[in-house]
Amino acid sequence: GGPRHSIIVGESGTGKTMLSRAMYHFAKKIKVISEDSPFIEVNCAQFTNPDIAAIEIFGSEKGAFTGAIEKKGLFELANGGIIFLDEAHALEKYQTMLLKAIETGKIRRIGGTRDIEVRVIIIAASTKNLKRVFLPELYQRLAQYEIKVPPLRKRPFCEKEQILEHFKNNYEKAALDRYGIKLNVEFTNAARGLLLNGYYPRNVRQFRDVIYSSIDAATPLINNINQEKEVVSVVDLEHIPLDMIDDYEQAWDKDENN
C-alpha cells in the first residue's frame, strides 16, 4: 500500500502541513517515491482568485490570456513526488482539471492544447468539509485515505503533554545547533498546568508560539551566557504571555454552542 491520494481535514493550525510532510518522508522510506522526489506545497487560498491559483498549479501557455507567459505549473514541478494542496476548496471550478490529472495522469496548462504526463500523489487539505465542496467523483478519487486531524482541545491530555515536550526539545535543540548552548528548559507545575489547560483556537500552531514565547521570556539573553556551562531556564507563570492565550471560560462556551 503506502501513501496514495489523500484528504486531510482539520481546523486551522492543527498540523495538516506537518502531517503531509510526514507522509512524504514515509513514502520515501517505503520507496513508493524515490529519495530525490519533490514535495510541492501550495496554499490554494493565498491567491486573489481561483484563476490565478489554477495558473500556478497547472501552468500556462503563452498567449492564453493577456500577458500570459509559458509557465510550468506546480504539478509539473511535483512530477514523481507529492503535491500538497492546502485549502483545496479554493480551486472551485478547476476541480475538473484535478480530476483529469488523477484519472489520466495528464494535465493541460491553462490555454494549452497539449497534454503533459505527470505522476503525482495528491494530498488535499482543507479547513472546510471537502465532501460538501468537491465534485463527488473527485472526492472519491482523492479520499483513498481520509484523515481527520482533531483540534487541540479535543486531544487527550497525555497528547498535549507530548506536544509540549516536543516543542521544549525543539527549542533546546535550536539553542544547541544555533548558539552551541546546552539549554535545559523546565516548567514549574503552575506554568505547566496553565499551558496545558489554555484554550488555543488556532490549535497546535498557537500552542507552539505560546510555548516558545514563554521559554524566550525565561531564558537569559544569549550574549550574557557563558558558552561552556549548561543553562537552566525555569518557566514560571510570569513568563507566559497571557494575551496570547484566549480567555478560557468564554472560549469553551463558544465551543459548546457550535
Image (cartoon, rainbow, N blue to C red):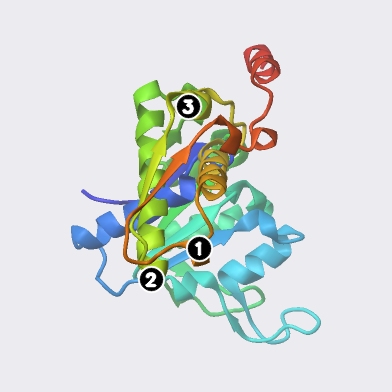
Q: Residue furthest left?
A: 30
Going by the numbered disc 1, the residue's amino acid type is Asn
Q: What crowding class fits label 3: few (fewer than 14 Cα within 10 Å), some (14-19), or many (20 or more)?
A: some
For residue 186, what is the image quadrant? top left
Ranked by sequence position, the earlier of labels 2 and 3 is 2
Residue 198 picture location, percent across and down: 56, 26
* Label 3 sits on residue: 196
Q: Position of residue 92 (x, y in %)?
A: 67, 50
Disc 2 versus disc 3: distance between alpha carbons? 36 Å
Residue closer to the observer: 172 or 146: 172
Mark number for residue 31?
none
The answer to whether residue 30 is visible is: yes
Tell how many labels: 3
Residue behind mark 2: 38
Which badge, 3 or 1, is on the more N-terminal residue? 3
**Residue 63, percent across and down?**
73, 85
**Residue at horizontal 67 percent and vertical 76 percent from the top:** 111
The answer to the question of whether label 1 and label 2 lie on touching residues, with beta carbons closer than 8 A, is no
Q: Amino acid at mark 3?
A: Leu
Q: Are the two marked residues, 2 and 3, in contact with CB atoms closer than 8 angstroms?
A: no
55 vs 182, left or right, is: right
